[in-house]
Amino acid sequence: MTPPPPLGRPRNKDGPAFDPALDDTALAAARDALARGRWADARQLLARTGDDWDRRGHRLVALGRPPTAAAWAREWQLAEPDSPDAAALLAFATVFRALGGKDAPDAARALCLAAGRMAPRDPTPWLGALVLARRTGTDDERVRAFDQVRARHRDHHHAHHLMAACLAEHQDGDRDDPLHEVYDFAAWAAEQAPADSPLAVLPVVAHAERYRVLARAGLEPGDPARSGHWRTRRARQVMKSAFDWWLEWDVDEDAADAPDTAGSSHPRRKVDLNFLAHAKLHEGRTAEAAALLTRIGPHATPAPWSYPGQDPGAAFRAARRAALGAG
């Protein structure tokens, strides 16, 4: 899914700076009010969020980032010492202070654990512990925090992305390893996720995270957009991951032939089978593509992408002729 546009567009030499609130206007308003000491707005926002765990995690991350968040979260907790929301906000604010060198990591970790005890079903305090452990903890601490998040919400979007980043940062040797553990983790997570989960794209994220690490180590060009290397080998790796997990993911014969539901985002719709057919064309699996095109019928359209050196139109026409001949 394409990220939403930033609320503000400050620019610097490194490119645009995105607002952590993204397009959540209610969150941006509560964060700005919190900066002025009005913690009641954050209180109302978190109460409305309820147990939408992915949204709650995003909102607490954004609310906890500003430098003044800890002071106002502490004031809120003094007023409402039994509030799990106040405890969670103070934990996140202290995590970010610890990452900035202004508080001890042990203090931030203790606050995350305390917030977790106040709301045992909530994965969000453990998300705070994972944010902290990524920079200050051991591998065991990172895995434990991730496991605790997943035990409470197994498809937690942010936690899976954080864990992919943590694993991608393990660098042995002076080159990329196609069997790197981050790729196995991303494939496993995508397999485990339900059929409409955004975690299907995690294998693509794994490639992007590995590229970030390799570029930082000087093992890949710093600007992939200007690199022919990116547009060939690395681009094919990323696109193949997208084909394998976004398009081919969890398609079975019975569900694929079921009547389409208007407005459905399910990957078994005919349009997604059409994408899958074209992915197979680009991989040279013409017979499989022809079989899919036969099932899809007149819905099939020319491919919206291509690999370097391949003519998607010619491949499509050849498979279409084979499909019609087989029929």
Image (cartoon, rainbow, N blue to C red):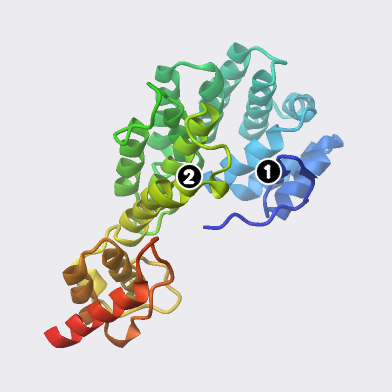
Q: Which residue is mark 2?
A: 157
Q: Residue furthest right?
A: 36
- Quarter where residue 94 is shown: top right
* Mark 1 residue crowding within 10 angstroms, few (<14) / some (14–19) / many (20+): some
Determine whether, in the image, residue 24 is placed left or right of residue 51: right
> Between 244 and 22, which is closer to the camera in this rendering?
244
User: Which part of the image, by quadrant, shows the C terminus?
Assistant: bottom left
* Mark 2 residue crowding within 10 angstroms, few (<14) / some (14–19) / many (20+): some
Q: What kind of residue is marked 2?
A: His
Q: From the viewer's perspective, is residue 41 above or below residue 80?
A: below
> Between 212 and 310, which is closer to the camera in this rendering?
310
Q: Which residue is mark 1?
A: 20
Image spot of residue 56 (x, y percent): 58, 43
* Residue displayed at 66% across by 25% down: 96
> Between 27 and 204, which is closer to the camera in this rendering?
204
- Mark sitting earlier along the chain (2/1): 1
